[in-house]
Amino acid sequence: MMTLTYKNILTSTEDQIGIVTLNRPTVLNALSHELMDELVKALEEFDRDDNIRVIILTGSERAFAAGADIKEMSDETTISIMNKDRFATWDRVRCTKKPIIAAVSGFALGGGCELVMTCDMIVASETAQFGQPEINIGVIPGAGGTQRLTRVVGKHKAMEIILTGRTITAHEAHAMGLVNRVAPVELYLDEAKALAKEIAKKSPVAVKLAKEAILKAFDGSLVEGLEFERKNFYMLFSSEDQKEGMRAFLEKRQATFTGR
Amino acid sequence: MAEETILLTEIKNGVGIITLNRPDKLNSFTDELTFRLQDALKEMEKSKDVKAIVITGAGRGFCAGQDLQSRSISHEEGVRPSLGDSIRRRYNPIITKIRRMEKPIIAAVNGVAAGAGASLAFACDYRIVAEGVSFIQSFTKVGLVPDSGATFLLPRLIGATRAFDLMLSADKLEAKEALELGAINKIVAADALMKEATELAEKLAKGPTKAFALTKRAVNRSMFCDLEELLEYEAQLQEIAGRSDDFAEGVKAFVEKRTPAYTGK
């Protein structure tokens, strides 16, 4: 595996888990262009690596990411910011085929919160704070916040969070269904790893196709989604993992999945 | 007294000592004093040199709660203050900080603790109390609702029956009874109070402070999980009480040193 060196992130692997750690501590991991480019490269690298089955995206205890890099943006005009097309990088995060678990502690604000919601599952420390404070600086979420938050927590809660710019605690986020699990700050990363390891044991083909089908529920109609799901379901019957999984079930033993 | 000295802090041997210092006013809370106390708690939470905290009062009172003089001024001007906002900005952050800070906090109760002053003592992890001291839920005396966590903390410390009685009667809860009810840890002679409290704090400071922090976190989860929700609810109720004729009359009667004539409105 070719290992790229990065300036704004750290990457590591643990068993079959690829871990990306946002690492701009002096600016609470503000999401600069350069950081986002590196993040996408790291995700694509893990996505191609057959030894990796699940990806964890995390920050520091103090901050997952406090937002976009406002310094980079403050002088942009409509035309200049459109031409830079910064969100093209963000769209590539969404294209990651393997499941991504966000392990969040401290601030996940603005772009940080949107990046978290682009992930597939969220494990939060008790100290995590989520919010879309863009309204406070005269803009709105631009990396999917109005769409993803609304789909997760519903119109009324999303309106309140985005229109007031107020932050919510990990426990509130959990109650709203935004967060999968809440753990003490000393343990949130372990909790994310435990979840990742559990998923890493499953058939990677089935995991990928399931993720793809779940995400499909967000675009398009139910009928299209159901058809898409069915197609992916049928497709799995050409995999060895399906044969092995069902055989092991009938033989009452643990399945060994190979990803073929 | 100069504003700078209304709250004193000292850090020694791993212990942070916070002294409310308006002795001529029984250390009652002005806006400034509540904000100074918030800042002091924040600093001590951050400081690596502070492993345990003692809160006490200078002179013969621990803390008499809200300074009613500052309330009566706005009433005289015909303004009914928004008590809800005052509580949200001034008192609730103090109570939340004391409970959520993962360092043990000892109230060294040197004299009377009334109103929000009693709530302050109840929010702490330990209460070491000087002989003869009493706690008073004085809120209803002036037509208000117990606040700063009193309706949450006192029933949990001594049970709802006696707590409700104390809140409606505004009678003194004497140290002796408080000890029998399990509301305080210890009664000591007045001149031994600070020695006892600092010795306890120094002992805690030398202990396994991470385990202590985690224990406080667990007790918070077990006992004080919805504290913030109730603090907000108290603020709402106090907003209602603060708009009442009874409160206006209560403060007026207090300042004029006469019995208030309440109407229930």
Image (spheres, coloured by chain):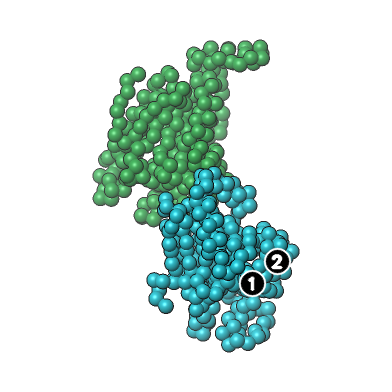
- The residue tagged with tag 1: helix, strand or loop? loop
Say which of B187 and A240 sits in front: B187
Q: Which residue is mark 2?
A: B177
For residue A86, above or below residue A226: below
Q: Colour of chain A?
A: green
Say which quadrant the C terminus of chain B sits in. bottom right
Which chain's residue wears label 1? B
Q: Position of residue A218 (x, y in %)?
A: 50, 36
Q: Position of residue A125 (x, y in %)?
A: 50, 42
Say which of A110 and B215 sits in front: B215
Q: Residue at x 41, y 44 (%)?
A: A63
Q: Which residue is mark 1?
A: B132
Which chain's residue wears label 2? B
Q: Amino acid at mark 1?
A: Gly
Q: Colour of chain B?
A: cyan
- Crowd rating for badge 1 (residues with CA inside 10 Å; few <14, some 14–19, many 20+): some
Say which of B204 and B260 sits in front: B204
For residue A79, above or below residue B89: above
- Crowd rating for badge 2 (residues with CA inside 10 Å; few <14, some 14–19, many 20+): few
